[in-house]
Amino acid sequence: MITVEGLTRKYGSFTAVDNVSFVCQPGRVTGFLGPNGAGKTTTMRVMVGLTPPTSGRATIGGHLYQHIPNPGRHVGVLLDASAQHGGRTGREVLEIGARTMGLPSSRVDEMLEMVSLTSGEAKRRLRNYSLGMKQRLGIAHALLGDPSVLILDEPANGLDPAGIRWMRGLLKGYAERGGTVLLSSHLLHEVEQIADEMILIGNGRIVAQGDKKTLLAGDATTASTLVTALDNQVLADALAAKGIAVTGAGEGLRVDAATVDVGRVAAENAIVLTDLRAAEGGLEDLFLALTAETQREAVV
Amino acid sequence: MVADAHHLGHAIDISSTSPTPFWRLVRVELRKSYDTRAGFWLLAVIGLIVLAAEIIVLAVVTTQDESIALGDFVAVAAFLTSFLLPVLGIMVLTTEWSQRTAMVTFALEPRRPLVIAAKALVGVLLTLATVAVSIVIGAVCNALYGVIEGSADWTFGWSDFWAFLLTQVLAMLGGFALAALLLNTPAAIVVFFVYKWVLPGLFELGAQLVGWFGDLRPWLDFQSAQNAIWEWSSSGEDWANLVVSGVVWLGLPLAFGIWRVLRAEVK
């Protein structure tokens, strides 16, 4: 479990992380979501003792990271997959990690296999690795010591869609066995697919947290539905009669109401629906709205 | 471990994990000094330069029919390694910053002073190895000289050996101290060569022009002060000069550099 309490980090007059508190539970994948420069990386760096906090603290399993003996055996860390010596082979990077932690070389082979790096790829020097390969190696490095907590900064960055699916399976399985996972991303759909819990951060402050359902339910006023009926015009009239706003969207309609309300109107009027679902990007709208002040582009 | 965490609830049980022993850090740091091409070739080049220089010396003295002793071969090696070992001392430390691996190193071992101590010890071990290799190369060349010229002079006292060893360790640590201070390979190398080449001239000039500086100079000139080691000086003041100038050129940069590394945000 990771506990962050009132964490603040200032750089001169700039506050990178502003009184941030949250908890990552074991058995759950927690997504740390926010635009670039929101303070995700700084928060994670404080967690593993690389950046001293200005005030507040972060503990892992009840301990400050610096107080955990041989921390690699308890906490797997991947902050920057590119922060490795370009002249070292992938295998050597893991070998050094394993030796520091006091693990046998056989562990290196297990990890290489787990992240699907072939022995040929493992013999190549890191400067010849693609970002996706570096991420796989970084995940292998984080998992070397069989830790119970994983802290991963933008691990999906550079992975291809198959790689992202692979990582999703890996992290879900890891959490199901009782592990704690915190992973950051600036891409909503990445986190949405992997995370059980989400923490949204913008401008150094936490703007929302909870699971996906809670986050959407908390924003029911802006619920929006995509619907297609055999006769869209009849449905549009029926909805309009109830005072619900309707706009055309592709082959169907976009309705400013929850799916259940649209379904009820259709049932009352015996209208046949061919498609009914909550509007995609609902969470994305929420994400953009919540972080609007910190976005570089204005939300349209 | 993952299964354990499930039973333990939210706390991590660290009671059964022992801290990383220092010798393991030293072994890892030693491995890191030669497991990249840059590191491997730096070590190889030190050996090759010493070898090439000794062969040239051997060729010159045999063709000119001059006499030479083992101590002379070792002195040639000592002159060269006093430039190369500081670069080694610099690289041992600065590569962690130039390649940004310090993030990984300090995440796996948050006790940063131990990591720096392990690196300094690796520098010393590599210096000992260099000294050993230099003496072996010198001995082989001296033996060849004996074969070619009929007889060889094996004059090389223990005092020379210890002086060689000590001055090389000090040279390496000089580079290491500057590296800790600057955490940047090119800057540390440039500053080191200014210290090595330019500073003695400035000291000389200062001593000539400013009277009182002549008295102060022995307390600041670490390079000249090291002559006390070669001569095994019996003067207490010579050794006091060595200690004081050593504090200025090794102690202060090292202390300030380590203080900075301990406080610094590792990027």
Image (cartoon, grey):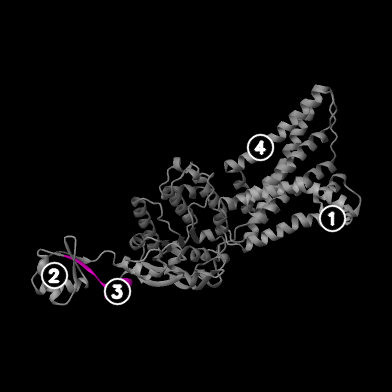
- Chain of the residue under label 1: B
Query: Which kind of residue does numbered mark 3 sit on?
Result: Ala
Most foreground residue, A211 or A104 = A211
C-alpha span from label 2 to label 3: 25 Å
Instruction: Name the element at disc 2.
Output: helix
CA separation in Å, label 1 and label 3: 75 Å
Chain designation of label 3: A
Picture disc at residue A236: 2
Examine the rendered structure and indicate whether residue B101 appears above or below residue A191: above
Residue A68 in percent (x, y) is at: 56, 65
Q: How many residues crowd mark 4 within 10 Å: few (<14), some (14–19), many (20+)?
A: few
Q: Nearer the viewer, mark 1 or mark 3?
A: 1
Question: Dot 3, how many residues are within 10 Å of its Cα: few (below 14), some (14-19), or many (20+)?
Answer: few
Front tag of 1 and 2 = 2
- Reading the image, the residue beneath label 3 is A217
In the displayed structure, A208 sits above or below A143; it is below
- Relative to A26, B88 lies left or right: right
Q: Amino acid at mark 1?
A: Trp
Mark pair 1, 2: CA separation? 94 Å
Q: CA distance from mark 4 to mark 1?
A: 34 Å
Mark toward the viewer: 4 or 2: 2
The label number, if any, that marks residue B219 in the structure image:
1
Tell me the distance, in whole angstroms, between the alpha carbons under discs 4 and 2. 81 Å
Are both tags, 4 and 3, on one chain? no
Q: Report whether B115 appears left or right of A42.
A: right
Q: Earlier in the sequence, mark 4 or mark 1?
A: 4
* The residue stretch that appears in magenta: A215-227
Q: Nearer the viewer, mark 4 or mark 1?
A: 1
Q: Secondary structure at mark 3?
A: helix
Q: Earlier in the sequence, mark 2 or mark 3?
A: 3
Secondary structure of the residue carrying numbered label 1: helix
Indicate yes or no whether the magenta region holds residue A219. yes
